[in-house]
Amino acid sequence: MQKILNYINGELVEPNSKKWIDNIDPATGDVYSLIPDSDSSDIDSAARAAKDAFPAWANTSNEERYRVLNKLVELIKENADELALAESIDNGKPLKLAQKVDIPRAWQNFEFFATGIMHFASESHNMQAANTINYTLRQPIGVVGCISPWNLPLYLFTWKIAPAIAAGNCVVAKPSEVTPMTAYLLSELAIKAGLPKGVLNIVHGLGHKVGDSITRNPEIKAISFTGGTKTGEAIASIAAPMFKKLSLELGGKNPNLVFADCDYKKALSTSVMSSFANQGQICLCGSRIYIEESIYEKFKEDFVAKVNKLKVGNPLDSDSNLGAVVSKDHQEKVLSYIDLAVEEGGTILTGGKKLELDGECKNGYFIAPTVIEGLDNNCRIQQEEIFGPVVTLTPFKNEEHALELANSSQYGLSSTIWTQDLNRANRIANKIDAGIVWVNCWLHRDLRTPFGGVKNSGVGREGGFEVFKFFTEPKNVCIQWS
Ligand code: NAD
């Protein structure tokens, strides 16, 4: 059985505990590799290695860091097929999605931030009348921790570690224990790329052990976390009293507002995608669909007809639109929400059940894409994050009502607005509680833009220069001349 290894101080090593966790292929239910069951002693070693590597790495030029990271870009490109297959098997997502989105984004993250650091500049503030000038240094923080989730494994893992390393920090990183494989393959590529030892350390294992140890380790001065809101809360409660810098990218329950004057065809087909891409397991999926009353019945009928055409199948088949959800636990969680929707008075328009496929995927974790209507906006199904292939449809009367429904949520990650009236789009964009607003599109990503949420969807922004600001410490120098 293949063993995934930790990457500490430039070497691939077994966990100190010599214990292992089963890694399951969600499309078959089979154990296919073993994950290190690491603990705080592995994190201590990784943090020490990172601390030792920091002075030299922080002193390399931006151009030198760019060169090393670009080697990694080339290696990810060369190994893209293997990485995409590994991602699909580990996560259950359609292979074609991993090929088209996840793996290209992994090398793009390194390329973007390695280039970005060469354009990153700091401010100066002139006090002419006082013969004084301030300039601000932006210095790397030191050892930083990056903790990522399972839904876009390599995509989100590299989204954090690339800017951290490019900015001159050394990293102790933990991918999700549910999908560790591509982070392991990345550690092999980092060695090949000649990344100096200790600059990147990847420790695998359980959240409450490895993630918690990253949070508590006093050498780790900043934590960049993407995952659930509850986990974010736990991390903040430990890290805040230690005065660590924190970036928390958390859960969402994103509204998708469809107005009668929208480009109907585009709104319809994009809404199917924004509901069920990656089995609905993207933090940016629009799981609450609000439709203007006058087109509600038509949109509902057309939407359900389109959803019924989606094929749930073996993730490795090129005609599968949806693969497996990530784990048995997650499948059970999503199915329990579907049961709750019925208890809360919802009507299931399509889906609503697990699917048993034939052949090698017989024991895999599949769920039919599910559309529910008739739920009060305050019920749990409309308020809690399900993070699976389940969406609700709700009619609204007018713009004010749509906004009220959209904002009645503890979350505020992203939102989508479908209307041809740009005045209305701007009015709503101004007032909606979300860090990200898409108008007449979804998941268009320009990596220069600030990325993150408000309310319980998180604190801080990633992307562009925002993330370099997070991964550097500003130091102001004030000079007076006579
Ligand atoms: P999770 O919070 O369970 O786990 C995320 C990571 O945190 C994993 O690596 C896990 O091992 C680790 N972890 C768990 N407990 C920990 C602890 N006590 N201390 C430190 N680390 C710990 O989330 P998940 O189930 O992997 O991912 C799904 C969630 O992630 C959803 O809520 C989704 O919305 C969110 N998400 C948010 C974004 C965003 O950008 N805002 C992007 C993707 C996913």
Image: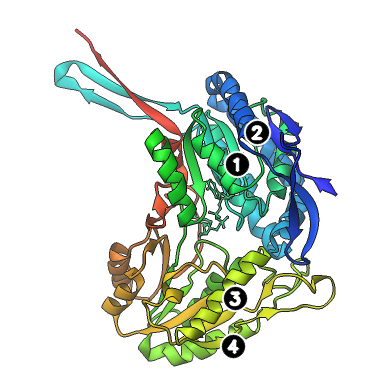
The residue mark sitting in front, 1 or 4, is 1
Q: Is mark 1 within 8 Å of ligand 1?
A: yes
Residue 7 visible in rendering:
yes
Instruction: Please give the residue where the numbered disc 1 appears in the rendered image.
Output: 210
Q: Which residue is mark 2?
A: 42
Q: Is residue 434 left or right of residue 78?
A: left
Q: How many marks?
A: 4
Tag 2 near tag 1, CB within 8 Å: yes
Does residue 352 lie above or below 247 as drawn?
A: below
Camera-side residue of 53 and 32:
32
Of the residues under marks 1 and 4, which one precedes in the sequence?
A: 1
The residue under label 3 is 335
- Residue 50 at x, y percent in the picture: 59, 27
Name the secondary structure under disc 4. helix
Q: Residue at x 39, y 46 (%)?
A: 460
Q: Which residue lies under the disc numbered 4?
A: 305
Tag 4: amino acid: Ala
